[in-house]
Amino acid sequence: MSDRDITLLSIESSCDETAAAVVKNGREVLSDIISSQISTHQTYGGVVPEIASRMHTEAIVSCVRTALSEAGISAAGLDGVAVTGGPGLVGALLVGVSFAKAFAFANDLPLVNVHHIDGHISANYIEDPLLAPPFLCLVASGGHSHLVLVKDYGVYEILGQTRDDAAGEAFDKVARALGLGYPGGPAIDRAAAGGDPDAYRFPQAKIEGASYDFSFSGLKSTVLNLLNQSRMTGEEIRIPDVAASFQRAVVDVLEEHLLRAAEETGVGVLSIAGGVASNSCLRERLRTSCASRGLRFICPKPVLCTDNAAMIGAAGYYAYLRGVRADWSLNAEPNLPLGSRERRYHAR
Ligand code: KG4
Ligand code: ZN
């Protein structure tokens, strides 16, 4: 903790949301502006990287202006700028990184490079202002599925990760095959509400041994095969039933891994992060199973689970305190691994 307040402007542009926020001491969100491009990408059935970059360019100035004015702060009242440096779409990341560098340079502010997944995990600090490591976090987004032991602020041990598709990617691909559109996760969540999760028995991906790794491509292929077969035979299928059964299979495996990790590590505080963490079935299931086991469960509001800049401000604060600083050579890193070595300098 710092003995004085630290207020950061934070910027996120790794995929299809342009976002800017002002966050005090990593926990208090003074403003949180998100300009979503989803309606544009829906036309194409997925994110078109070139369009995403152009739209970030169009939106970023007004997002930052609004974030500052809603927080009632000017650049002079800030202590630094935190920005997602990776991973993500390179052209999309570059817009946020370039803007953050220019803003920090022009206003003589330190620049903090934040890993996107560090951001997702740190959304939990906003949800629960008393949360402190160690805790377990299940990160499930469009690009990542990680089971992480948070040992300290920004210090992560990856217990397991996906060996193929990310959980959100599986939701998106299955939704597309079902004709539910993009983004697939919310569409399947809605469709599943009217379906029977017992209608189909889809396989739960089991990895040899007691691994915490995930695999979702087999499950996805089983659903796609079922749809192809029904098209060929003319057999009618109920989309809500397929959606509910698929969702159940994903939630089963995510829940099993997280609860097993709690049991084996003895860590009694569990949390979730990333777009898939806004899934209503996953949230409900974990609420119930954690309550019955006496585990503490932190469940960030859906808007803190999908991409936003407040979470980057939370992660950026702890990185700032650790002395993490980027210089003007900062570049977007589309494949930045979680836990890669930080560049630390003495605070400027
Ligand atoms: O974290 P996020 O906003 O962006 C990435 O970092 O990827 O996650 C987006 C992913 C998409 O795959 C989307 O379909 C999924 O999160 N998602 C959901 C739900 N809302 C978003 N998946 C399941 N249920 C939801 N309600
Ligand atoms: Zn994300």
Image (cartoon, helix red, strand yellow):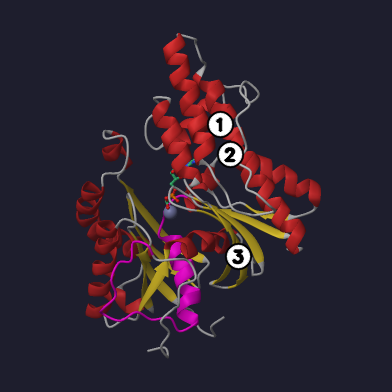
Magenta part of the chain: 306-335
* Residue at (39% x, 30% y) in the render: 176
Q: Is residue 325 magenta?
A: yes
Q: Nearer the viewer, residue 273 or 223?
A: 223
State the residue position of label 1: 246
**Structural distance between the alpha carbons of marks 2 and 1:** 6 Å
Question: Is 145 on the left or on the right of 259, as rendered?
Answer: left
Could you tell me the amino acid type at mark 2? Val
Q: Position of residue 190 (x, y in %)?
A: 50, 29
* First reached walking from the N terminus: tag 1 or tag 3: 3
| Prevailing secondary structure class for the magenta stretch in the rendered image | loop
Q: Position of residue 90 (x, y in %)?
A: 28, 59
Q: From the Cβ of disc 2, is ligand 1 less than 8 Å away?
A: no
Q: Answer whether residue 248 is visible to the viewer in this image.
A: yes
* Residue at (51% x, 47% y) in the render: 302
**Structural distance between the alpha carbons of marks 1 and 3:** 34 Å
Crowdedness near tag 3: few (<14), some (14–19) or many (≥20) residues, C-alpha within 10 Å: few
Crowdedness near tag 2: few (<14), some (14–19) or many (≥20) residues, C-alpha within 10 Å: many
At numbered mark 3, what does the secondary structure look like: helix, strand or loop?
Answer: loop
Residue farthest right in this picture: 293
* Residue at (37% x, 65% y) in the render: 84
Could you tell me the amino acid type at mark 1? Phe
Could you tell me the amino acid type at mark 3? Pro
State the residue position of label 2: 250
Q: Quadrant of residue 125?
A: bottom right
Q: Is residue 317 magenta?
A: yes
Crowdedness near tag 1: few (<14), some (14–19) or many (≥20) residues, C-alpha within 10 Å: many
Q: Position of residue 55 (x, y in %)?
A: 22, 50
* First reached walking from the N terminus: tag 2 or tag 3: 3
Point out the image quarter for the C terminus: bottom left
Badge number at residue 129: 3
